Amino acid sequence: MEIDKIDQIIDKHHGEASSLLQILLDIQSENSWLTKEALGRVSEKLNVPLNRIQHIVTFYKAFSLVPKGRHQVHICVGTACHVRGATRILDTVEEATGIKPGETDLDLKFSLETVNCLGCCALGPVMEVDGKVHGKMSPVKTAEVLKMTVS
Amino acid sequence: MSEIQLQIDGKEVKAKEGMTLLEAAQNAGIFIPTLCHHEKLEPFGGCRFCIVEVEVNGWTKLVVSCVYPVEENIIVRTRSEKVDRIRKTIIELLMAHAPDSPQLQDLAQEYGAVRDRFEKDASFCIHCGLCVRYCAEVAKKNAIGFVGRGINKEISFIPEIAAKECNNCKECFPLCPTSYLQAAFVLVEALAFPSPSSKPEPEE
Ligand code: SF4
Ligand code: FES
Ligand code: FES
């Protein structure tokens, strides 16, 4: 991510240290991960020490310090989805992509995460791909969704 | 500033408004044990070891003395069965992480804590935050910070800053109750800024 782009985001928030979280979120959604350079730049421009920024970005799961794949896959493992077989869905995704929750594959195709309830338990087991919710999943359907995503 | 009158361990004590219970006790020569408190640093309230019993209008409650402001006419007990039991458990929990810390061992003796009560998870750091806060508030270098949260929380040096600042400072070292800080420093030193003497000799 270019320095200009980061500066733009910082300027949009008037370079105020109180907007730190919002600035980091904006960079995260723009670039899908936070580079060391970006954090250094934010620290410098907002005059917030890097160790504090580091604490914040490692605290929230919304931030990533490693590159993310082009497609974000979230598998719900909340109670309702769990009893309806979320583990089988997760297994299917792990097998198809070769990655475990929290990881990204080498081609940067997928990033996989588990979540603890997407708020639509009646549709369980639920999987979310790039913000779109897919309900009543079965291993077969899961494999299809993944195939459609990359095609 | 108005004066506040309170009682600590049966002794009448005067304190200034805005003081913490811990400060009031210390001024009166009454000892309250602490782990994460340091007079040069802002109150943190991280370890809960300084817990005391406070009685207000006949009701007792447990408060953390290093962050609790003094109040008129309260009765404070720095030791009681309940307080001692809580402190004992705190030490036992911390000893699961840092079983060999001399400071914890001394306290364990005082409170009858059992070193091996909980299964060991030797992560050594007890998250007192003394190193992090000292570096930020007194040394003003911000070379070290916390990362992660919950059971994954750790201290972490920022190698670029540490390489520049730490060798001439190291003032945080004696503050660490477990010497994990030194270990972390040696590690970052070796990984991120090896000293000239540890570089391999150029071949002849
Ligand atoms: S490394 Fe030591 S001083 Fe720093 S937070 Fe951990 S226990 Fe406290
Ligand atoms: S548990 Fe999966 S959506 Fe609620
Ligand atoms: S000394 Fe009060 S909480 Fe640690």
Image (cartoon, coloured by chain):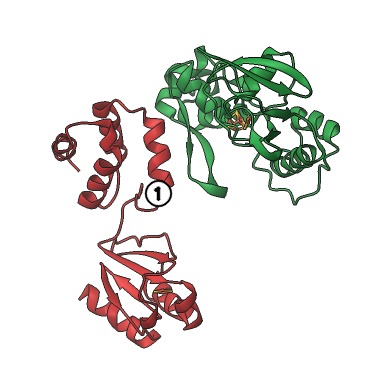
**Residue drawn at the location 76% of the way across and 50% of the way down:** B118
Please state the horizontal and vertical placement of residue B64, each as a whole percent of the image. Answer: 63, 33
**Apparent side of residue B125 relative to residue B203 in the rendered image (left or right):** right
**Outermost residue to the front:** B57
Please state the horizontal and vertical placement of residue B111, each as a whole percent of the image. Answer: 83, 35
Dot 1: few (<14), some (14–19), or many (≥20) neighbours within 10 Å? Answer: few
**Apparent side of residue A108 relative to residue B112 in the rendered image (left or right):** left
The hue used for chain B is green
**Residue drawn at the location 50% of the way across and 34% of the way down:** B156
Please state the horizontal and vertical placement of residue A28, each as a whole percent of the image. Answer: 26, 49
Please state the horizontal and vertical placement of residue A121, each as a whole percent of the image. Answer: 39, 78
* Quadrant including the N terminus of chain A: top left
Q: Is residue B115 above or below residue B107?
A: below
**Apparent side of residue A87 relative to residue A131 in the rendered image (left or right):** right
Which corner quadrant of the image does residue A148 belong to?
Answer: bottom left
Total marks placed: 1
Q: Is residue A26 above or below residue B68?
A: below
Q: Which chain is red?
A: A
